[in-house]
Image (cartoon, rainbow, N blue to C red):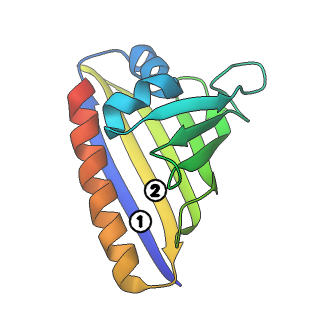
């Protein structure tokens, strides 16, 4: 398996609390990704918290991501739990940091692919999509 890693960093002129709240809400992610994103299961204690599931994309190729960890205004961790085609062990982490002018988000994704070429292409497409999507809301 080919291990892949993506890191995208975006600065915001908004407080961490505002950026965290926006990106934690599954229903806002359509604007970031440019594809349909919908919460399909509420989390425990918070609709977008641990255990919440979002569907991304168009059926029958949609994937489901499950939130597996949240530290309020600091980080969100998620994994693909359904779909994803040839990708395995897909894990994403958003890390939120206060800055002098607002905040910074680092979005990191790791995954494995049985075919190195597929992994490389997916890595490039995801990195470009995340970079453009985060700039839309900056």
Determine whether 88 is above or below 23 in the image: below
* Towards the viewer: 114 or 100: 114
* Towards the viewer: 56 or 126: 56
Mark 2–mark 1 distance (CA, rounded to whole Å)? 6 Å
Residue matched to label 1: 5
The residue at 52%/69% (across/down) is 87
Name the quadrant containing residue 82. bottom right
The x and y percentages for residue 38 are 53, 30
Residue extending farthest to the right is: 44
Residue matched to label 2: 109
Answer with left or right where residue 19 lies relative to residue 121: right
Task: Residue 39: give its label.
Answer: none
Determine whether 21 is above or below 64 in the image: above
**Residues marked 2 and 1 touching at CB (< 8 Å):** yes
**Quadrant in which the C terminus appears:** top left
The x and y percentages for residue 105 are 36, 36
Name the quadrant containing residue 106. top left
Answer with left or right where residue 6 lies relative to residue 38: left
């Amino acid at each position: 398996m080919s291990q892949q890693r993506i890191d995208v960093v975006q600065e915001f002129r908004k407080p961490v609390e505002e950026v965290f709240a926006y990106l934690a809400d599954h229903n806002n992610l359509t604007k970031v990704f440019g594809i349909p994103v919908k919460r399909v299961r509420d989390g425990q204690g918070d609709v977008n918290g641990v255990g919440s599931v979002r569907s991304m994309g168009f059926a029958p190729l949609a994937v489901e991501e499950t939130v597996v960890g949240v530290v309020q205004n600091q980080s969100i961790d998620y994994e693909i739990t359904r779909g994803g085609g040839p990708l395995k062990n897909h894990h994403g982490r958003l890390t939120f940091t206060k800055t002098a002018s607002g905040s910074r988000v680092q979005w990191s994704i790791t995954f494995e692919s049985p075919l190195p070429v597929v992994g490389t292409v997916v890595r490039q497409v995801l990195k470009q999509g995340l970079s453009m999507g985060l700039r839309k809301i900056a």
